[in-house]
Amino acid sequence: MLESGLSNCTDRHAINAIPVKKVIAAITFVLWSVTVHANAPAEITVSVAPSAVKVEAELVTPTRSWSFRNAYAGSLGFAERITDFRAVDASGQNAGAKNIAPGEFRSDRDATRISYTVDLSTTNAADVPHISWLTSGRGFLLFADLIPRDIESLSADFKLPFGSMIESTISPDKKGRYQVLEPESAVFLVGPELRKTSDVISGMALDFVVSGTWPFKEKRAFDGATQIMKQYLALTRHRLPGKSSIMIAPFRLSPAATWKAETRGSTLMLVIDPDAQLNWVGQLRVIFTHELLHLWVPNALKLEGDYDWFFEGFTLYIALRTAVELRIIDFDEYLRTLAGVYDAYSSHPDDVSLIEASESRWTTSNTNVYVKGMLVAFLYDLKIRKESGGAAALADRYRELFDGRVAANANGNDAIISLLDSTPAMSGFAKLYVAGKTKIALEQLLPAYGLTLDTSGKKSQIRVNRDLDAEQKQLLRSLGYRG
């Protein structure tokens, strides 16, 4: 309408005769309409069955192609579970959708609606919790693999079987719909009789959702989680925005595993074999020390690139330190754990840098992202405590990650290496052990800190030296030594 009105004005006087306010109003309306259309979410309906979901989507923009995630975290074939994919055009006619490759669908004409079914009954134990699954109507629904990657925002409605419940960090609106701005991190737990405990921990909202029957007291497990959340708030001095959730569900795993976990977005998903024999509360607290730190690192950081050596290896070490500080484990267990990690490190070649190991983390069997990353963090912590006379520790670098020194969307490797090497005493350390291919030899490095490595038995042992000087004693006491 605006375009035709202007095109009919053939001279300067006619153009000037148009009221300026009307032109501005018309332009504003057009721009508003375009913006609303571009930002409007797709409307999704997810119908949940005991072992499958049917997804129906009203699209904002007519399209002819859809792409689904088919691999993640070393697991493959996610999209092969999609069946009966259909696309409908604006007139309600079949748009001729075809499956041209795993996870890739095309239609002959522009479609405004799609529907499909995802079979979640055959999920392999090796793939959880990285993938959506349902067993007898109970399980995790992850929009990262259920929704086409082309849909950037959506409004979701769930149709659940009688007696089922659903929980998420995303709260439903008054109409019961979930407004999902980041489908890649959206997690929903469905099942009968979900039990939820909620609290606000130092200004951070936390839900604890449990599915199934377990031998542990849920209040004790929740109390352990809140204690760890407070510890990590003190560590980072960064208060998490929004709500976080810990969600626990049963899944029969392989004999080699009793539990598996992933922290995605603001949700910690924990699947536990219902037949597992565990020291339940103690084991849960150990799991929480690692997984809850992921709410901050990397999930609350806006860094780019593959820096898994830091948010996995260093996180393992900080989790171990946290377990000591909260007296979940003692100092002897701290040393035993590190000795075991060194045995794991020594049993495999170390011929790539930690940056290279991070880039190939899911395509090789190299575990150095975890084991070498953890040992480098250990050595960094020892060295910075010694060089500073106990005035500094690795924990200080975590605070600096969140105090504005690291720019959003910076390269994670460059930013963190620069931060770790930022003090004169530590200059070059991260470049040597992270960017470089320097091997770790604890037997040569530990004596300077009052420790020795004994490799004479089946398992290595790290021991405190009998004769400690004052500086070594102060250092080790800062780590929890009571001698």
Image: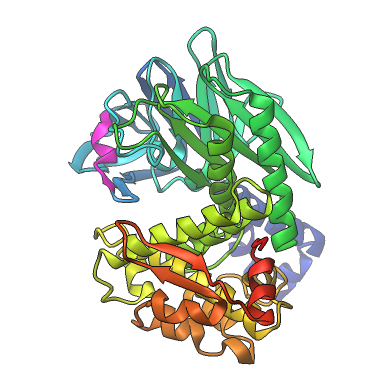
Residue interval drawn in magenta? 75-84
Give whichever of 419, 388 is nearer the camera: 388
User: Residue 258 location, x and y as percent?
Assistant: 39, 33
Give whichever of 87, 83 is nearer the camera: 83
The answer to whether residue 109 of the structure is visible from this angle is yes
Q: How many marks?
A: 0
Give whichever of 164, 247 is nearer the camera: 247
At 69% from the left edge and 26% from the top edge, which residue is drawn?
219
At 53% from the left edge and 61% from the top edge, which residue is drawn?
317
Classify residue 418 by image quadrant. bottom right
User: Residue 346 location, x and y as percent?
Assistant: 30, 67
**Relative to 371, is 38 on the left or the right?**
right
Name the quarter where the C terminus is drawn.
bottom right
At 34% from the left edge and 77% from the top edge, which residue is drawn?
353
The answer to whether residue 41 of the structure is visible from this angle is no
User: Residue 455 location, x and y as percent?
Assistant: 34, 66
Figure check: 410 above or below 24 = below
Classify residue 363 by image quadrant. bottom left
**Relative to 119, is 431 on the left or the right?**
right
**Is residue 394 one of those drawn in magenta?**
no
At 30% from the left edge and 37% from the top edge, which residue is drawn?
256
Figure check: 108 above or below 295 = above
